Image (tube, rainbow, N blue to C red):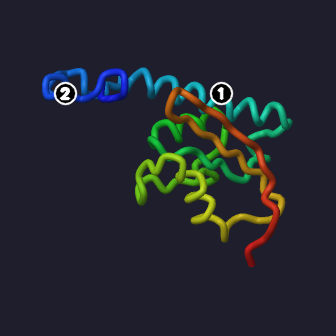
Amino acid sequence: MGGSKEPVTKENAESDGMYVFQEGKTVFKHAVQNMADVAVEIMERNNLKAEDVAWLVPHQANLRIIDATANRMGVGKEKVMVNIEKYGNTTAGTIPLCLWEWEKQLKKGDNIVLASFGGGFTWGAIYLKWAYNTN
């Protein structure tokens, strides 16, 4: 309710139809499975082993999803950029914020996997090589 098809009225504004509902467990399960699977697929397509990955830069929605993705990839926590405790879930800004915060630790040639899960049950990952040193 509330769109052009069914504009807001006093009656429907007071009904349960105006609230968003999310099945948290279902979303979590799909996020863990799909974000982890796509990150592993990127590694396989590029013949990367866990030890080849310098950094995992995951979407910062939930620490358990981040941990599950890193575990599935075989990447240790020391290689995972996490800043959810500082900013929370900044939606599309989570990965750029991590890269900005960790930029001084990145070295030319680092293999980096970016992985995300978002609205509409979309997910994706990319592999990139860092292009420069910051020193």
Observer-side mark, 2 or 1, equals 2
- Label 2 – label 1 distance at C-alpha: 44 Å
> Which is nearer the eye, 98 or 78?
98
Name the residue that disc number 1 marks.
37
Image side of residue 83 versus residue 133, left or right:
left
| Residue 11: % across, % down | 14, 23
For image coordinates 39% across by 23% down, the residue present is 25
Up/down of 41 relative to 83, above or below: above
| Residue 56: % across, % down | 65, 48
For image coordinates 81% across by 54% down, the residue present is 129
For image coordinates 54% across by 48% down, the residue present is 92
Q: Quadrant of residue 14?
A: top left
| Residue 81: % across, % down | 58, 54
| Residue 134: % across, % down | 73, 74
**Extreme residue toward the bottom, this view:** 135
> Which is nearer the eye, 66 or 23?
23
Q: Answer few, some or many: residues within 10 Å of disc 2's Cα (few below 14, many 20 plus, some between 14 and 19).
A: few
Name the residue that disc number 2 marks.
9
Q: Answer few, some or many: residues within 10 Å of disc 1's Cα (few below 14, many 20 plus, some between 14 and 19).
A: some
Is the C terminus in the top left, top right, bottom left or bottom right quadrant? bottom right
